Image (cartoon, rainbow, N blue to C red):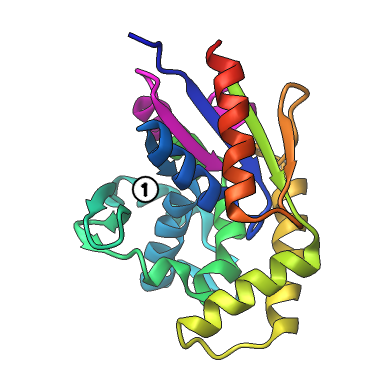
Amino acid sequence: MQKKITIAIDGYSSCGKSTLAKSLAKKINYIFIDSGAMYRGVTLYCMRNQLIENGTPSTEKIINLLNEINLSFEYNTKTDKADLFLNNENVEELIRMPDVAANVSKIATIKEVRQRLVEEQQKMGVNGGIIMDGRDIGSVVFPAAELKLFVTASNEIRAQRRFDELIDKGVQTTFQEVYDNLVQRDELDSNRIESPLIQTSDAIVIDTSHLTREEQLNLAYHLYQKAID
């Protein structure tokens, strides 16, 4: 039986890393975990409980309430992917909304939040056979992952992809609003003290700017085959 490895995929928001991770996981029959969804789930909880005031998280209150936040994934047969549940409520659609996106990087800077979620993520990958995407997967969550990918794309293309996605969902926004939000999140993610977004020295870069989804998958699958060989 072929050994199941751990695959870590990191990158900026809206660069296509989750789409690539899900496609690869399906192709090789691995479990896909969207770590970013977990941070969005915590953010949604904080917003619902008035733990973000005037754009600033109430850090001490959030830390004290972490044990009240239960996150889990359940497979959705209709969408063929795992949905995030927050305290037994399916919040998959809610965590993708712009207001959550605007706050998630602020919540992700809180050391205790990251420690709690990293611990949960590491438990999920203890037996291998997992693909996890996020911003600190190869550097912090699974530093010994057998395959690390760093996915990127130009700011303009990333913003256009995200804008099109939101419009398809009926969300009223503008391209400039989406673009500015991406740039702000990049700044926060790359410069936070706790587990900043970095490209590790052993990560292989995939620039999705001008690659079709099929081309991205074929490239990732080729790299997977090299890793297991």
Whether residue 135 is visible, yes or no, is no
Residue at the outermost bottom position: 172
> In percent of the image, x 48 and y 23: which residue is there?
6
Q: Tell me the quarter of the picture where residue 80 sits.
A: bottom left
Q: Tell me the quarter of the picture where residue 137 sits.
A: top right
Between 139 and 47, the residue placed more toward the observer is 139
> In percent of the image, x 63 and y 60: which residue is there?
14
Give how far across and how far down residue 135 sits, in percent: 62, 43
Identify residue type, mark 1: Leu
Give how far across and how far down residue 47 sits, in percent: 43, 70
Screen quadrant of the C terminus: top right
Between 80 and 38, the residue placed more toward the observer is 80
Give how far across and how far down residue 180 sits, in percent: 75, 74
Screen quadrant of the N terminus: top left
Between 101 and 111, the residue placed more toward the observer is 101
Q: How many marks?
A: 1
120 horizontally vs 222: left or right: left
Q: Mark 1 points at which residue?
A: 66
Magenta-drawn segment: 119-146
> In percent of the image, x 19 and y 57: which residue is there?
88
> In percent of the image, x 72 and y 30: which residue is there?
204
